[in-house]
Image (cartoon, coloured by chain):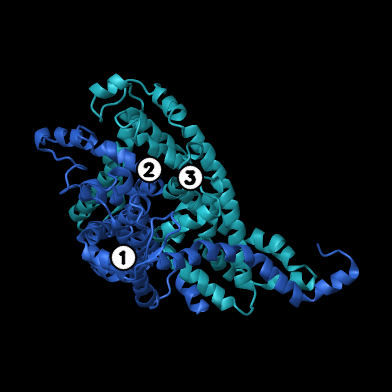
Chain colours: A blue, B cyan
Amino acid sequence: MEKTSNSFLDFFKKRKVQKSIIIVLFLTVPLVLLVLFTYVPLGDMVKYSFEKWNGTSKNHEFVGWDNYKTIFERPEYLRVLKNSIYYFVGSIVQIIAALYFATILNYKIKGANIFKGIIFFPTLLNGVAVGLMFNYFYRGGGTLDTLLTALGCDPETLPLWLGDAAIVNYSLVLVSLWRYMGQNMVMFNGAIQSVSSELIEAASLDGASKWQQFRYIILPNIKTIVSLNIILAVKGAISVFEIPYIMTDGQNGSSTFVMKTLDTAFVSRKYGLASALGVVLLIFIMVVTFVQKYFIEGREVDDYGRTKRGAKAR
Amino acid sequence: MAGQSAVLKQGKSTRKTHKPFKTHFWQFVRYLSLIFISFCTLLPLVTAFFGAFKTKTEFATSNPLALPKSFLNFDNFIEAFEKGKMLLGFGNTIIILFFSLIATILTGTMTAYILNRFRFPGRNLINTLFLVASLIPSITMQMSVFQIINKLGLFNTRLSTIILYAGTDIISIYIFIQFLENISTSLDESAIMDGASYFTIYRKIILPLLKPAIVTVIIIKGVGYYNDFYTPYLYMPKTELKTISTALFAFKGPYGSQWEIICAGTIITMIPTLIIFLLLQRQIYEGMTAGSVKE
């Protein structure tokens, strides 16, 4: 590349020109993609949210705030948001369980790596496979029913795990717990391992109980990553989609906000309303992200760099 | 798990305190809880595995916890592969994985190289554009993204999924930038002294140095793309374009009550994941932890 004709070479040796060329050359494609698939859709979504439109016709009718009014006036749209509470509570249980297992795996445990591997493995699995597998697990006369019958439950009294509106959300949350607990655990385990074992030993010699060791030595040292996971749990709970879509298609009151949004667009073909739902969801998530950035990550710099970068970028 | 008692004995002999009973008790609780959670984790997987080997009549008459008569009955797998279009699904998934990963790595390393190594007007603006975009969950904007894909004529093409994967991926850029921050610029500088062009520096110095970060990105993104369901489901509904996820999802209809086929399909889908996990455990733990924090 460098060994071309001489005058040309001299010209290119002016590194300033070369620098400009490489910057333009390397950034054009990523920036075009960024604008085309993030910023243009963002602008479009906001625009659509003030329109009545079926997604295909040329006829966009401006309706002002009507779509937003519909969302807040008709209970069917906000009611699905209530389902996020199940997932959020589930995530908190998940974080507590993950903390527990991350802590005990730090003790001398035979086969610790095998346990860790088993608990973590579901995180890597294909969501459709997980969904279908749990459909099989929960179905009438399926694995769960058989197991409970073997343990002495009366098969007549067992509920329809996915067919009963009072239970379906718990069943689905359990799938999410099954799937993601291991990921939290591995993250916490990594953080706990970075806590000095001498400190823990010293406390142990001073007569601190296991709980005190956890409460006063381990927990303060991994606070950042735990807070971060709670925030991610909130975001995750608002944007649940895949598992309920695959397993129940939102039946029996298991629909979520994202499912409702996508259904409104692609099934009911109410693009304007769907876009307004998207904007509302986006605002929720941005608020949570703001809390995360400025109240949690802003305080301390974690091991994973985002804050460091964020600070530099600003 | 059969070695529970042996394991406990080991625990006894290695832990010595003046409160032996209490220590043993807690060690017992620890093992018990680990065995319990492992059982809960494995139960759905193992029963699906059993189910996949059962014949139709066997399936109807035996209970889900019972072992299949033979682990050599591959009929369900063959049916899932052939009629369930899973072979096609694997083909499309591999094509999409290959091109998306190459595109992600190229755009990611190029962007990271420029943003980390150069100072120029507009750099802060571009940084901010990427940062803000990383905070927007793309699932909320699918209706307007759909319109753009449609206008570009990419609907029902593999390119739609490839371009969306590569074009909306910002985590990789951050992984590369973070990695570059820890690499001294002295190598670049001496190369500049030797008259190397910036492109040569990228090609001969930056890319090789980024190898570990590239591996991390391949793992995180590879797993993500392999598992992704909604993008191919929405943008490539055509039968010939089924990926592994959408092919498996289609089992819900025709095989709705043929659970043995569905079991076989889910097991087939999970096998590549299991192999990758067993081969690359350490890198996966590190990669998944780094990636998820940045989401």
Q: Is residue A107 visible?
A: no
**Local secondary structure at mark 1:** helix
On residue B286, the disc is none
**Residue with the mark numbered 3:** B236
Marks 3 and 2 sit apart, C-alpha to C-alpha, by 16 Å
Q: Is residue A305 left or right of residue A118?
A: right
Q: Position of residue A294 (x, y in %)?
A: 38, 77
Task: Please check whether the numbered discs 1 and 2 fall on a single chain.
Answer: yes
Q: Position of residue B15 (x, y in %)?
A: 29, 53
Q: Residues within 10 Å of mark 1 (few under 14, many from 20)?
A: many
- Disc 3 sits on a residue from what chain? B
- Disc 1 sits on a residue from what chain? A
For the residue pair B162 and A312, the one nearer the viewer reads as: B162
Task: Please check whether the numbered discs 3 and 2 fall on a single chain.
Answer: no
The residue positioned 38% from the left and 46% from the top of the image is: A127
Residue B52 lies in what quarter of the image? Answer: top left
Marks 3 and 1 sit apart, C-alpha to C-alpha, by 29 Å
Q: Position of residue A226 (x, y in %)?
A: 33, 66
Q: Is residue A76 left or right of residue B223?
A: left
Marks 1 and 2 sit apart, C-alpha to C-alpha, by 33 Å
**Residue with the mark numbered 2:** A128
Residue A283 lies in what quarter of the image? Answer: bottom left
Q: Quadrant of the N terminus of chain A?
A: bottom right
Q: Position of residue B7 (x, y in %)?
A: 30, 43
User: What is the three-letter code of the residue carrying label 2?
Assistant: Val
Q: From this view, report whether residue B262 is shown above or below residue A5.
A: above
**Local secondary structure at mark 2:** helix
User: What is the three-letter code of the residue carrying label 3?
Assistant: Met
**Local secondary structure at mark 3:** loop
Mark 3–mark 2 contact, CB under 8 Å?
A: no
Q: Residues within 10 Å of mark 3 (few under 14, many from 20)?
A: many
For the residue pair B154 and A308, the one nearer the viewer reads as: B154
